[in-house]
Amino acid sequence: MSLDKVTEIIAKFAKCRAEDIKPESELAALGLTSLDTITVLFEFEEAFDIEIPNEVIPSIVTVRDILEKMSAI
Amino acid sequence: MNKHRVVVTGLGTVSGPGLNTAEFWDALKAGRSAIQPLNPPVEKVKISSAAAVPEYVPENYFSPSDLSILDRFSQLAVIAAREAAADAGLNCGNEMLTNAAALIGSGCGGKHTDEATYDQLYKQQRSRAHPLTIPKGMPSAAASMVSYHLGIKGPTFALASACASGAHAIIQGMTMIKSGMIDVALAGATDAPFTYGLLKSWEALRVVSDDTCRPFCADRSGLVLGEGAGILLLESEQHAIARNARIYAELAGCGMTSDAGHVTRPDIKGITNAMKNALHHAGLSPDDVDYINAHGTGTQLNDVTETEAIKQVFGEYARKLAVSSTKSMHGHALGASSALELAATVLAIHHDIIPPTANFTVADELCDLDYVPNKARQQEVNVAMSNAFAFGGLNAVLVLKKYA
């Protein structure tokens, strides 16, 4: 899973320009609500045919967190 | 001036006849039916006619992110609500609208969303539903979306009473304004029923016509489904006068009953009582009424029962009444139908034009009133009644008056 792919999916929901999405960006700061974040995770599950457990979700704060958590699954 | 009088100052419609109220009224006064072959035909569905909303580009009305959470029934509601508010001269952000109520009924809710999800889960065997399935498909989604898109922060909820949902929502708005709780309400209903499961379910009831809707005719063959939304902007007379609003008509009274009887066969006592209660509530006599916009579904049972009920309520005067069914033109848009019919009734009073019963051939011998066949009639309309008799025996009747 690449940072580009993560950025591409987040950009669909972020309330900022795609180039402003950095690995250290917090999802909330990008304008994502908790419902947006869950929808982003759904898109990852669909795109990569994975199951993201509920207990992972509280630890996802930044873009990098998504990349790392997804890579670990 | 009485703050407890309720007037209609804005109309919004999306329906088979058109994407706005000007198109809706042009079609109705021309007697032009929007019923057409179901397009595209749905495989394994026998229903072949429909009054579908004309094709429109959702992106012309909503942003992509907004569309992700807008079921079709919510889209139609928001488009109609925006029109009603603008027609009344109120825009999003106006404090009068911010404090308003949004009361949006629906007969079937977010069926497009629900059925797409079931198709993915049951048929395609996918393992997960989209996270927005619940907020997009819930029966109150359209009410929420009207609130969201118009900046309404007053009382907002959905009402459901099958084909009377719109009438009940408008009565709810009227009652809240009469009580002094609110000054302004957007009230009506929305339905988008052209989904595979719902079409098959209506097919199973064997009440849908193979070709078109001919209310009160000897050769009538059933109802034709429609889709759309009808939203009325209601306000207290005092509020409307204070802001110099254009007043279309006064909501003078309402009557609501339930049959506690058969689930699909209308009960003559239930519907006559609803009409009588509405007249009583309005403080009017039967012979004050000029026009009835009938429930007029075009089914065997409804049209005979409704005709007999009108004769029981109005006596000999029933022969002098104009009675028409605009479902012959906008189809039976379920919960939205009663709201669209209210809009048609308001316009009949405003323009002194009675929309006809389209597709009219020869009257059933048991349907012997003046159904205004095929051609609109220029006639003074001071008082009009709109009937809605829903499956499950839920009846709602509104009486409107020319504002004076």
Image: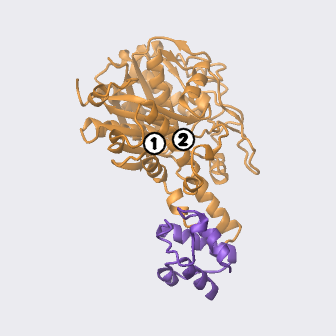
Chain colours: A purple, B orange
Residue B304 sits above or below residue B170 on the image: above
The residue labelled by disc 2 is B334
The residue nearer to you, when weighing B261 against B232, is: B232
Please give the name of the residue rendered at 62% of the width and 47% of the height, measured from the top-left corner. Answer: B59
The residue nearer to you, when weighing A12 against B34, is: A12
Task: Answer yes or no: is residue B266 visible.
Answer: no
Please give the name of the residue rendered at 76% of the width and 50% of the height, measured from the top-left corner. Answer: B43
Residue B391 sits above or below residue B133 on the image: above
Res B168 quadrant in image: top left
Q: Looking at numbered disc 1 in the image, what kind of residue is underneath it? A: Ser
Q: Looking at numbered disc 2 in the image, what kind of residue is underneath it? A: Leu
Percent x, y for residue B369? 52, 17
Horizontal relation, residue B96 to residue A2: left or right:
left
Q: Are marks 2 and 1 in contact (CB under 8 Å)?
A: yes
Residue B376 sits above or below residue B125 on the image: above
* Marks 2 and 1 share the same chain: yes
The residue nearer to you, when weighing B107 against B256, is: B107
Of marks 2 and 1, which one's residue comes earlier in the chain? 1
Q: Secondary structure at mark 2?
A: loop
Percent x, y for residue B210? 71, 36
How many neighbours does mark 1 have within 10 angstroms: few (below 14), some (14-19), or many (20 or more)? many
The residue labelled by disc 1 is B165
Task: Answer yes or no: is residue B48 visible.
Answer: yes
Percent x, y for residue B335? 50, 42
Please give the name of the residue rendered at 51% of the width and 43% of the height, measured from the top-left corner. Answer: B77
Q: Secondary structure at mark 1?
A: helix
